[in-house]
Image (tube, rainbow, N blue to C red):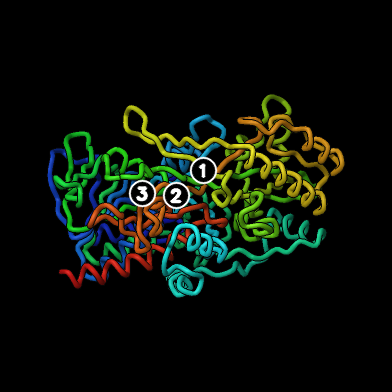
Amino acid sequence: MAERNFAEIRGIPDPVLKGINQGWRTLDGSQISQSQTLKADVVIIGSGAGGGTSAEILAQAGLKVIILEAGPLKTTNDFDMDETRAYKNLYQEHAGRMNKDGSMSILQGRCVGGSTVINWTSSFRTPKQTLQYWQDEFQLKNCSESEMAPWFEKMETRLNISPWPVPPNENNAVLSRGAEALGIPWKTIPRNVLGCWNLGYCGTGCPTNAKQSMLVTTIPAALEKDTQLIYNAPAEQLIFDDKKQKVLGVKIKTKAGELEIKADTFVMAAGGINSPALMLRSDAPDPENLIGKRTFLHPVAFSFAKFDEEIAPYYGAPQSVYSDHYQWQSVTGKVGYKLEVPPLHPSLTSALLLGHGPEHVKDMQSLPHLNAMIALMRDGFNEDSIGGSIELAEDGSPIIDYPINDYLWQGIQDAHFKMAELQFAAGAKAVKLAHIDSEWYSSWSDCKTAIENFPYISCRPLVGSAHVMGGLAMGEDKNQCLVDSQGKYHYLDNLFVFDGSVFPTSIGANPQLSIYGMACKNATTLAKKSLKQG
């Protein structure tokens, strides 16, 4: 009872279950017993930041919308702050998704609402340097800082995005204290929350509905407008007309047959891995062989620190402080990176610390006194940072071929130096880098010497990512881009892409607000165009 009704016993309503009981149109794809065909004005493939935003806008314009989601429908009553259940039920590949050579883990959501359900709520506008680079290098139009500002503002208002007003927890305060000691600027992170309880378990799904994810905002708004949500329904293939100029439908495999959905317009919003993979499975038109190329991940480096005082890194807003001091010192030179702080929950921490045996047990026992710091590498802005590619396994599932080259290794090593220095400056008694050869070091000088001698090669440092961008790049230069500046696929008349796969490089910031803003802009344009044509 307690597990199944975590929110209910605290007097917190489950808005999704309430809506379903009142007549929302939802369908569990795994329960479909026979082949059938459905029709809509617009089919949206994916229900995360891009799909959820698009669904609300298109449904409110009066269009008949069907949302397809590969993952399950999990709601407030399912969120009990249990890591094991969350990773199994809410994440791609049970939080075990990796790149091809196993050198990087990739955390992504796989549920109704996508990664917006399990992210840590950090919400940044696309940096002006990034927008300018896309304009200069990829001929992206109408997406300058001033042109995007009203769309970001609209989504900030819609999702209650604002700088976190509560003092940072001790875990985040390590970054701010260390930065101040070294004279490095830092700022407060904007978060998409309303009435946040400051629990700290955002990555397991919000049990209080405070996180303004697509699950509790735009998707319910779309369902109120007679949109249909079909979950546990992974899209297998797009169906094209004979000339491959138009999408006619999408096929979904079920246990007992095949579901086919036909529509006038299709919106791809399955994310930077699954959207290119679906296009590859469908053999979509691609004259320049660009599908899945230039995939970027914000590779993340980690550093841990022990303090005498209690840090309790598992409580409080998981991310509330950041520094871009090392991010934009050069746009196209050596790799820049954003400094942030992750929460440390027991299961996640046990993997990140890279230990085993008695020493690992000892480290885990010190969890209340641990801090962690992360650096998000800004990839894609240098000729030596070409990203990776999406390939298909024999069963059609995606393979992420993303090798970490010397350019990125140099950035990861530099980030290790800077994070360790910050942690010692904040008063750490010992620091350990997330590197298989690292020990705990009790002085900055010993730590610095160790980092200088670490091998920076595949699978020695721990590298992870939660941000996938690229693979269906946006811009008017067809030699480099598959999607135009309004999100329309260059080679198909009725296919639009409204997710992170359209970004021509990484963003240099947590991507959810960038996806919200771009999807809001382009879905609004699509809605007006569809109504005019209708």
Q: Residue at x 31, y 54 (%)?
A: 489
User: Residue 36, which numbered label?
Assistant: none
Badge 3 is on which residue? 270
Q: Could you tell me the amino acid type at mark 2?
A: Gly
Badge 2 is on which residue? 470
Badge 1 is on which residue? 387
Q: Residue at x 30, y 51 (%)?
A: 45
Q: Could you tell me the amino acid type at mark 3?
A: Ala
- Kindly indicate whether the residue at mark 1 contacts the one at mark 2 (C-beta within 8 angstroms): yes
Q: Residue at x 40, y 43 (%)?
A: 292
Name which of mark 2 and mark 3 comes first in the sequence: 3
**x and y percentages locating residue 121 in the rendered image:** 52, 58
Q: Residue at x 48, y 63 (%)?
A: 135
Decide which of 506, 416 is in the foreground and name it.
Answer: 506
Residue 76 in view: no
**x and y percentages locating residue 245 in the rendered image:** 20, 51
- Extreme-top residue of the structure: 357
Quadrant of residue 265 within the rendered picture:
bottom left
- Residue at mark 2 to residue at mark 3: CA–CA distance: 12 Å
Left-right relation of 179 to 464: right
Residue 91 in view: yes
